Amino acid sequence: MTQIDETNNDTARPTSGVTERSKRRDLIASTLGNVLEWYEWSAYAVFAPFIAAAMFNPDDPISGLLSTLGVFAVGFLMRPLGGIVFGMVADRRGRKFVLVTTMLMMAGGSLAMALMPTYQNAGAWASLLLLMVRVIQGFAHGGETATAYTYVAEIAPRRHRGLWGSAVFIAIFGGSVLAYGVAGGVTSIMPDDSVAEWGWRIPFILGAFLALAALYMRRNMGESEVFDEHTAGTEKPAPLPKAQVTRAIVLMIAMTSGVTAAHYTWTSYASTYAITQKGMDSGTAFWMTLLAQLIALATLPLWGWISDRVGRRPMMLIFAVLMIALSVPLTAMIGSAGWTLLLASAIALVIVAIPGALLSAILSENFPTRIRTRAIGFAYSISVAVFGGTAPYLNALFNSLDIGWLSSVYIVILCACTGVACFMMKETKGIDLKDA
């Protein structure tokens, strides 16, 4: 069994007086903060071609782009450490404390991105500073993501956990949409040379200031009732079976591998591919990707709602089958015309939205309260770092070597792993997280 049972206690519990209205307010606060975190994170990938020109040796643009995407991947490699460290903090001090702390760190990193010197001004030091900022943001992002998944699932009503949990991926898409919207506006209004010179800094300045409003909202959030009741317990719980914990972590890594690879390929690299490989205008590529993400975002509550009725496993299997079947033809569809990117990305991202809506619920339902955040932080961050954060780099590398078809094969293999993991899992829809 994937989900780890700690107790089957069905006795009545005291109520804390927390209303559903206050929970909805907390959901909004968490989601808006998460939107801004993902906006700041996505802005780097969206402006990768311009950052490459500013922060690395301009005499070798291909190397510069690969280096920028490599730094993107390094930020992801810090996420497992951030997920574990902040996960331990969240499982001891509470979910709210971590969500406020990571918000501060991401905002500081965004401000640093806006003000840092270029390669022309500081040489290799500029590249090093960029790397350091992304390492810090990756560390914070690992803790933010794991804690947000945990927090939203724990405050959600049992029968609507899939629907409420979809808010986390709404924030992920929302942040990316906001980043692409800013990118589209900047590249449409400003000439390319101005964007390359200083315009790429605009989204990071905006992100740093918007984070202040999100930080204020998060400071007024309530703590998760599930966490409060767990920490209020006086009895020492029995040790967790290590074999079951290990199995759950491995299955969650495998389950999310295809999801995260497909997600980052179609949100972070598809526009870069259209620009650098197909000659598409950068502004057109940004706007087409934004529209595709808006379409996918609109479907997220629907997938979460359906999962609350039919279960998590059927929805995950549908994603795996569709992505395996369509990865190659969707990539081949992209050409120099904007509509090709819009159509291919919209189809791919609507498919990615299916598991995305379920992740908060399904990850939280598979780990007990006392280790939930750190386990999610480790499993999900490992999967994202290894399979998601490296996806844009591998895509760019394969295309530079004229073997771009391997990018689709890579996604197909990982989605097959997702499908196998789902077959090995048991259905967890509607379980009581307070019993976990």
Image (tube, grey):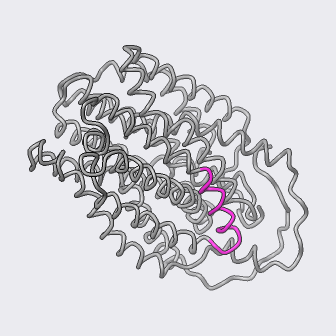
Farthest residue, direction top: 402
Residue 28, given in percent of the width and then of the height, sits at: 43, 69
Which part of the image, by quadrant, shows the N terminus?
A: top right
Query: 262 and 21: which one is in front?
Result: 262
Q: Would residue 115 be counted in the magenta stretch?
A: no
Residue 103 vertical placement versus 145 (above, below): below
Farthest residue, direction bottom: 17
Which part of the image, by quadrant, shows the C terminus?
A: bottom right
Residue 168, given in percent of the width and then of the height, sits at: 48, 57
Residue 192, given in percent of the width and then of the height, sits at: 12, 42
| Residue positioned 25% across, 40% down in the render | 53
Which of the 4 quarters of the picture holds residue 434?
bottom right
Residue 159 vertical placement versus 252 (above, below): below
Query: 420 and 401: which one is in front?
Result: 401
User: Would you say the magenta stretch is mainly helix, strand or loop?
Assistant: helix
Which of the 4 quarters of the picture holds residue 340?
top left
Query: 333 and 406: which one is in front?
Result: 406
Residue 267, given in percent of the width and then of the height, sits at: 37, 40
Residues drawn in magenta: 80-94
Query: 148 and 97: which one is in front?
Result: 97
State left or right for residue 300 relative to residue 90: left
State left or right for residue 406 relative to residue 371: left
State left or right for residue 281 relative to residue 265: left
Residue 162 vertical placement versus 339 (above, below): below
Residue 426 vertical placement versus 361 (above, below): above
Total marks in image? 0
Which of the 4 quarters of the picture holds residue 431?
bottom right
| Residue positioned 49% across, 74% down in the render | 26
Q: Would residue 88 be counted in the magenta stretch?
A: yes
| Residue positioned 48% across, 69% down in the render | 27
